[in-house]
Structure formats: structure tokens, C-alpha cells
Amino acid sequence: MSHPSPSGPAALPPTSHNRVEQAFEFLVFGSRWIQAPLYGGLIIAELLYATKFILELWEMAKHFKQLEETKFMLGVLGLIDVTMVANLLTMVIIGGYATFVSKLDLETHPDRPEWLTHVDPGTIKIKLAASLVGISSIHLLKSFVDIANENPDHVKWKIFIHLTFLGSAILLAYTDKLMQRDRKH
């Protein structure tokens, strides 16, 4: 009596068709590395954002005494905006790489972000949507702070865009909640 092999009850000897399929599947799986340079580019973009932050902060510090409160507040909101975009980039870089390219071996790293333990495409989408709402809020707040110099039509569009981002974020979160509930059942 023959014993079933570990690969199945009646494993067939490898054929050229099986080898072609295995090679193609390896190629498909390996294609995830095509995204690695994209994440490298986002790291460079984040470095540029950090440079922009430092330059804007330097300009604010140089002209601190001459800045009226409204201009100073707009400058601070600009710094917050740059920081939020940098946070968004960090989430996309780390979360996207870990989800779509390769597992990050950070289990023992003391600075490992808590959100990385439960990162998946749905979580990344919700975090991105929430970040977009936050960034949009900053832009809208900047418009309200400097409302005397804003075009009313532009403000209306900013409100519309903000509400669109907000609605999208709520729908994504609700959809994710439904999907989580369905996975538990």
C-alpha cells in the first residue's frame, strides 16, 4: 500500500505544464517588488516635505516680530498641513510596503507603531481618508482665518471638497465595520 505524499493524495509527477504554471505564479508573486521603487520615491517626497517644513519654520522665525497674529497663525497652520501630509506619506510608505511588498521584521523594535500590528488594505484606506479629512480641515481653517482675502467661490469649493472627503471617510469606515462584522460570523 502506498502512502499519500505531503503534496496531496495522488501527487502527479511534475510536468512541463506544472513547471510553467509554477514559474508564472512565482513571477506574479515577485511582481510586487515593482512597487518598491514607488515607495522609495515617496520617501524622497517625504524628505522634500521635511525640507519645506524647515524652510517655512525658518522664515517664520526670521520674521517673527514683524508677523501680525493672523499671518503667524496661517504660518503655523501651514506647518501643521505639511506635517499632516508627511504623516500621510509615512502611513502609505510603511503600511503599503508591509501590505503589498514585504513583511517588515519589526516585532522587537522599541519604536514600532501600534497601528502596524493590524495594518491591512482596509485600515490603510480608512487612515488615508481620515488624513485627507484632517488636511482638508486645515485648508478650510486657513481660508476662514484669512476670509477677507479669500474668493467666496473658492471657499464654497473647499467646503464642498471637505464634505466630500468627510462623507467618503464615513462610508469607508462604515463599510469596513460591516466587513469586520461579516468576518466574525
Image: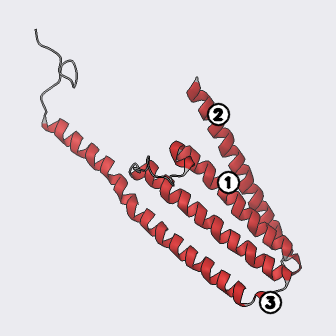
Per the image, label 3 sits on a secondary structure element best described as helix
Q: Cα distance, mark 2 to mark 1?
A: 18 Å
**Which three-letter amino acid code belongs to the residue tagged 1?**
Ala
Residue 120, can we see it? no
- Residue 184 vs 53, above or below: the answer is above
Query: Callout 3 environment at 10 Å: few (<14), some (14 to 19), or many (20+)?
Result: few
Q: Secondary structure at mark 1?
A: helix
* Disc 3 residue type (three-letter): Lys
Q: Position of residue 174 (x, y in %)?
A: 68, 40
Whether residue 35 sits left or right of residue 16 in the image: it is: right
Instruction: Please identify, in this view, whether the residue under mark 2 or under mark 1 is nearer the observer.
Output: 1
Instruction: State the image coordinates of residue 133 (x, y, percent, origin top left).
Output: 71, 58
Q: Residue at x 62, y 29 (%)?
A: 181
Task: Please give the residue where the numbered disc 1 appears in the rendered image.
Answer: 130
Few, some or many C-alpha atoms within 10 Å of disc 2 (few <14, some 14-19, many ≥20)?
few
Picture residue at 14% right of the left edge, 14% below the top: 3
Q: Answer yes or no: do the residues labelled 2 and 1 have beta carbons within 8 Å?
A: no
Disc 3 or disc 1, which is closer to the eye?
A: 3
State the quadrant of the C terminus. top right
Task: Answer few, some or many: residues within 10 Å of disc 1's Cα (few below 14, many 20 plus, some between 14 and 19).
Answer: many
Residue annotated with mark 3: 65
Q: Is residue 156 above or below residue 56?
A: above
Quadrant of residue 132 within the rendered picture = bottom right
What residue lies at 65% left-to-right and 36% top-to-bottom? 177
Q: State which tag comes first along the sequence, 2 or 1.
A: 1
**Residue 39 x, y percent position in the rendering:** 44, 63
Question: In front: 27, or 117?
Answer: 117
Q: Is residue 134 left or right of residue 70?
A: left
Q: Secondary structure at mark 2?
A: helix
* Residue projecting furthest to the top: 1
Disc 2 target residue: 178
Q: Residue at x 69, y 50 (%)?
A: 168
